[in-house]
C-alpha cells in the first residue's frame, strides 16, 4: 500500500534518474512504450486500403467517414486520458489505453456490419489517442536528460515503421489469390493486437514514473522505484556516478489542477511556449495530412500510376520518414533543439517548394516526384517528431499529459483541413496544386522560424530545469516563464 504525505519533502529523484547511463532498462522502456506510434501508423495504412468497404457495403462517403471516426476517437481518447494520466499516473494509463486499443482493433476485424465496425474503430482510436499522452509523458520522465531528445524523436518516428508494416500487410492479406475478399481484411486488423499483446508483459515491468509519484506525495514509493531502476542498471554492468546533491528539491504535492489554472499556465505564465507548441504542431500536421492523404491521387492523376501499384511508391516514402528521426535525432541533443527545428522545418519547406516548381513545369515523373517527397519528409519527419517532444517537455510535470492532449487535438483539427483542401486542388490542375504545395512549404518554414524565435534550449536539461513543477516548494532555480 502506498503512503501519501501532504508535507513538503526534499527529493533527489530527478537528479538520480538523469545521471543514469544508458542501459537495458532504458531499452525496455523504449521497446515497451514506443510501440504506440507503430500501432497508429499500422492502423492508418490498413484502413487506407479500404479492404473492408465491399464486405460491409460502404460507399465513398462512408469510407471517408471511417477515417474521420477513427480520428475523432483519437481526439476523445487524448482529451479524456490526458487528464487521467496526470491524475492517476502514467503506468495505469499506458496499460489501460493499450488494452482499449487491442479490444477495439480486434473487434473491428470481427464486425458483422458497418455500424459495429465504426463503433470499434472509434474505440481503437480512443486507445491510441490515450497512448500518445501517457507514453510521451512516461518516456520523457524515465529517460535521462542527455538522451531524451533523440529517444523521443526516434520513438515518434516509428509511426512510419508501422505504416510500412501495414502497407506490406495489405499487399499480402488483400491479395484475393491468397484470401477471400471478406477474410483478408479481417485478418489484417489483427496485426496490431498481436503486436500489442506481445509487449503487454514488458509494460507490466516498467515502473510508475518516480517523478509523477514524487509530485503526488508518494515519496517513499518514488524512492523505491528509483532504487529498483538503479539496481537494474547496475545489473547491466554499469557503475553509477555520484548524485549531485545541489539538485535536491523540496516538493509539496498538488491537488487536481482546475481548468482555470491550466489556462493561466498556458496563456499567462508560458505564452511564448504555447505559441511555439501550437505553431509546430499545427504546421507539421497540416503538411503531413495534405501530402500523405493525397499522394496516391496525385500519382494516379498526373503520372498514370495504377491504384494497385501506389503501395510500391509508398515504401520509399515511409522509409525516408523513418530514417529522418533515426539519423537526425541525436543532433537535437547535441546541436540543440531550436537550431535543429529551424533546420528540419526549413529544409523540408524548401525542398517542397522546389518540387512544386518542377511539378508546375511538368518536369517530374512518378519516380522523381517520390524521390523529392522522400527528401522533403526525411527532414519533415524529424521536425514533426520534435514537435511532440517539445510540447511534452516545456510545461510543468503535473500537466504534461494534458498539454500533449490539448496540443494534439488542436493539431488534428487543423490537419484535418489538409486532405479536403488538397483533394480539391488535385482536381483543379497543376497550377492550383502547385500553389497549394508552395503554401504548405511556406507554412512549414514559418513553423521553424517561430520555434527558433520562441523556443527553449532544452537539450541536456532536467525537465525540472525547463519548467518548474507546480508542486515545487523551494526557491526555483530554472524554468523561467516565457
Image (cartoon, rainbow, N blue to C red):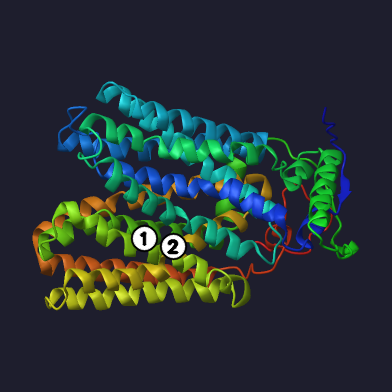
Distance CA(mark 2)–CA(mark 1): 6 Å
Residue for point 21% across, 54% down: 421
What is the x, y in percent for residue 171? 27, 48
Task: Identify the secondary structure beneath mark 1.
Answer: helix
Instruction: Say left or right for 51 vs 286.
Output: left
Asked if one can make out residue 277 in the rendered structure from this viewpoint, the answer is yes
Q: Which residue is mark 1?
A: 318
Q: Which residue is mark 2?
A: 322
How many marks can you see?
2
Most foreground residue, 262 or 28: 28
Query: Looking at the rendering, in which quadrant would you find the N terminus?
Result: top right
Image-quadrant location for residue 62: top left
What is the x, y in percent for residue 20? 78, 61
Instruction: Say left or right for 217 vs 175.
Output: right
Tell me whether circle 2 and circle 1 mark residues in contact (CB < 8 Å). yes
What is the x, y in percent for residue 339? 53, 76
Asked if one can make out residue 258 in the rendered structure from this viewpoint, the answer is no
Most foreground residue, 166 or 129: 166
Most foreground residue, 221 or 79: 221
Q: Residues within 10 Å of mark 1 (few under 14, many from 20)?
A: many
What is the x, y in percent for residue 72? 37, 37
Image-quadrant location for residue 289: bottom left
Image-quadrant location for residue 201: top right
Residue for point 11% across, 68% down: 430
Query: Looking at the rendering, in which quadrant would you find the C terminus?
Result: bottom right
Furthest residue toward front:
178
Instruction: Say left or right for 181 vs 222.
Output: left
Most foreground residue, 436 or 40: 40
390 vs 122: above or below: below
Task: Identify the secondary structure beneath mark 2.
Answer: helix
Q: Residues within 10 Å of mark 2 (few under 14, many from 20)?
A: many
Amino acid at each position: 500500500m502506498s503512503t501519501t504525505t501532504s508535507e513538503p519533502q526534499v527529493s533527489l529523484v530527478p537528479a538520480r534518474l538523469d545521471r543514469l547511463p544508458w542501459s537495458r532498462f532504458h531499452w525496455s522502456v523504449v521497446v515497451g512504450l514506443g510501440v504506440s506510434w507503430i500501432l497508429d501508423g499500422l492502423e492508418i495504412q490498413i484502413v487506407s486500403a479500404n479492404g473492408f468497404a465491399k464486405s460491409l457495403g460502404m460507399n465513398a462517403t462512408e469510407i471517408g467517414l471511417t477515417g474521420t471516426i477513427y480520428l475523432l476517437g483519437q481526439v476523445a481518447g487524448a482529451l479524456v486520458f490526458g487528464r487521467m494520466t496526470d491524475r492517476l499516473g502514467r503506468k495505469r494509463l499506458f496499460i489501460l489505453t493499450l488494452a482499449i486499443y487491442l479490444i477495439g482493433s480486434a473487434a473491428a476485424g470481427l464486425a458483422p456490419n458497418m455500424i459495429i465496425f465504426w463503433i470499434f474503430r472509434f474505440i481503437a482510436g480512443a486507445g491510441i489517442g490515450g497512448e500518445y499522452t501517457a507514453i510521451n509523458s512516461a518516456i520523457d520522465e524515465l529517460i535521462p536528460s542527455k538522451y531524451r531528445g533523440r529517444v523521443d524523436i526516434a520513438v515518434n518516428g516509428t509511426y512510419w515503421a508501422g505504416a510500412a508494416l501495414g502497407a506490406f500487410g495489405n499487399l499480402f492479406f488483400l491479395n484475393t489469390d491468397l484470401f477471400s475478399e471478406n477474410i483478408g481484411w479481417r485478418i489484417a486488423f489483427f496485426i496490431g493486437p498481436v503486436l500489442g499483446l506481445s509487449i503487454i508483459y514488458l509494460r507490466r515491468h516498467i515502473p510508475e514514473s518516480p517523478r509523477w509519484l514524487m509530485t503526488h506525495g508518494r515519496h517513499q514509493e518514488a524512492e523505491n522505484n528509483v532504487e529498483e531502476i538503479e539496481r537494474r542498471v547496475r545489473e547491466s554492468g554499469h557503475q553509477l556516478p555520484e548524485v549531485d546533491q545541489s539538485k535536491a528539491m523540496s516538493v509539496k504535492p498538488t491537488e487536481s489542477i482546475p481548468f482555470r489554472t491550466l489556462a493561466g499556465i498556458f496563456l499567462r505564465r508560458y505564452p511564448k511556449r504555447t505559441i511555439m507548441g501550437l505553431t509546430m504542431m499545427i504546421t507539421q500536421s497540416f503538411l503531413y495530412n495534405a501530402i500523405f492523404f493525397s499522394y496516391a491521387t496525385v500519382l494516379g492523376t498526373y503520372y498514370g500510376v495504377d491504384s494497385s501499384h501506389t503501395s510500391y511508391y509508398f515504401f520509399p516514402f515511409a522509409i525516408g520518414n523513418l530514417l529522418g528521426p533515426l539519423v537526425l535525432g541525436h543532433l537535437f541533443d547535441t546541436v540543440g533543439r531550436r537550431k535543429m527545428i529551424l533546420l528540419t522545418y526549413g529544409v523540408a519547406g524548401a525542398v517542397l517548394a522546389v518540387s512544386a516548381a518542377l511539378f508546375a513545369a511538368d518536369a517530374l515523373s512518378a519516380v522523381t516526384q517520390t524521390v523529392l517527397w522522400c527528401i522533403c519528409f526525411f527532414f519533415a519527419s524529424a521536425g514533426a517528431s520534435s514537435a511532440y517532444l517539445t510540447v511534452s517537455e516545456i510545461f510543468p510535470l503535473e500537466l504534461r499529459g494534458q498539454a500533449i492532449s490539448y496540443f494534439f487535438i488542436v493539431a488534428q483539427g487543423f490537419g484535418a483541413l489538409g486532405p479536403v483542401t488538397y483533394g480539391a486542388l488535385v482536381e483543379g490542375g497543376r497550377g492550383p496544386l502547385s500553389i497549394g504545395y508552395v503554401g504548405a512549404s511556406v507554412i512549414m518554414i514559418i513553423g521553424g522560424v517561430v520555434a527558433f524565435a520562441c523556443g527553449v534550449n532544452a537539450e541536456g536539461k532536467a525537465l525540472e530545469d525547463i519548467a518548474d513543477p507546480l508542486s515545487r516548494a523551494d526557491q526555483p532555480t530554472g524554468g523561467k516563464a516565457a
